[in-house]
Image (spheres, rainbow, N blue to C red):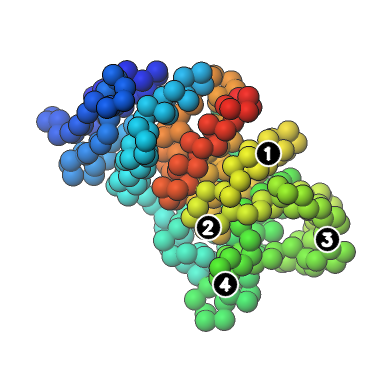
Amino acid sequence: MLVRYPLSGIRYPVIFGLSVIRTVIRVVKNPVSAHPWPCKIKLSPDVATAAQVEAVQTEHTVDGFMGDLQRIRCGNDSVLHEEFQILETWDSAREKNCTAAEKGRTRNRFVDILPNDDTRVILRGPDDYINASLIDGYNNAGQFIATQGPVGPEETTDGRKESTVDDFWRMIWEKNVQCVLMLTDCVENMRQRCTQYWPPLGETRKFGEVEVDLISESVDPVCTHRELDITRDGERRQLSQYHFLNWRDAKGPECTGHLLDFVERVMNKQFRKPIVVHCSAGVGRTGVLIALWRLIERARNERVIDIFGTVDALRRQRSRMVQTPEQYLSLYEAVSLAIDEDRL
């Protein structure tokens, strides 16, 4: 079923295998504009739980995005919240197989944030589990690894968790990673979000079979940039870590412009894939950054923006990517600012 609205390029297709259509879409007149806009989209339980349900695709041209967004919002963000709720419904209904994660449950920072078996990062050897997922970029399969913040020994005293720092560095080495993007502080609001998995400046530490040496560290208003040497079996490699600042859990970034600067800075380095991205759970802030990266690249190449479709695609590879309504709306804010500043 394809329902079209007079919005440049926006489409709401719903594909399902039911003989009777029960999707209800209520459209009201915008009191300001002569154009009708969808103010609420409801799915029946039959459709919402059907395995055949596909994502709504909401596409805009770059040139038309700002006008489209102004008309959609109508003074509030109710339609964007509806978009997010549809993502939530379909993500919950989507079949998932997380057998490996359930077996390795003590290595999960959160019991409800698990990688799918078909996209999980597989380490070498029989002990192959880490809570990490391969995520596609724009026309670039497996460009990213989305992962949780490593769990440190200080977090394992109750016996419910194992330290995952050695596994993290093992993944960095085995996947030949050049760049890590860190989007959380180690401690936020008095809670441990991620252990410090690198040594202090000028020190060398060994994590499993990987020796890590922090050789430089610089700080600016956007991020902290660290350069590390990593060594295993006599072979030495260089790793760049970019640590984004001032982004609270479950929220959008405090400064959208800084997030755009951060993404473009790393983009311009042209690191080989995969790029490791992590926050605390590896879905919220991690999902926003990967989504924004993909949105920027597609906008520059195709002149098309599809925030809903991009987030839905990420969630098919790692559930709950872009975890909260605030984070979803932050993508609209980031794209709007990118257009205002002629970055697209």
Residue 205, horizontal then vertical, whole percent: 80, 67
As measured in the structure, the alpha-carbon distance from the residue carrying label 4 to the one carrying label 3 is: 28 Å
The answer to whether residue 328 is above or below residue 56 is: below
Residue 80, horizontal then vertical, whole percent: 37, 38
- Residue that mark 4 sits on: 190
Residue 58, horizontal then vertical, whole percent: 39, 28
* 343 left or right, relative to 136: right
* Quarter residue 343 falls in: top right
**Reading the chain from its start, which is encountered first: label 3 or label 1?**
3
Q: Nearest the camera: 281 or 260?
A: 260
Residue 213 shows which numbered tag?
3
The amino acid type, in three-letter code, at marker 4 is Met
The amino acid type, in three-letter code, at marker 1 is Asp
Residue at (48% x, 25% y) in the render: 66
Figure quadrant of the C terminus:
top right
- Residue that mark 1 sits on: 261
The amino acid type, in three-letter code, at marker 3 is Asp
Figure quadrant of the N terminus:
top left
Element under disc 4 = loop
The answer to whether residue 254 is above or below residue 280 is: above
Residue at (52% x, 65% y) in the render: 109
Q: Nearest the camera: 227 or 126?
A: 227
For the residues labelled 4 and 3, say whether their Cβ atoms are less than 8 Å apart: no
- Residue that mark 2 sits on: 249
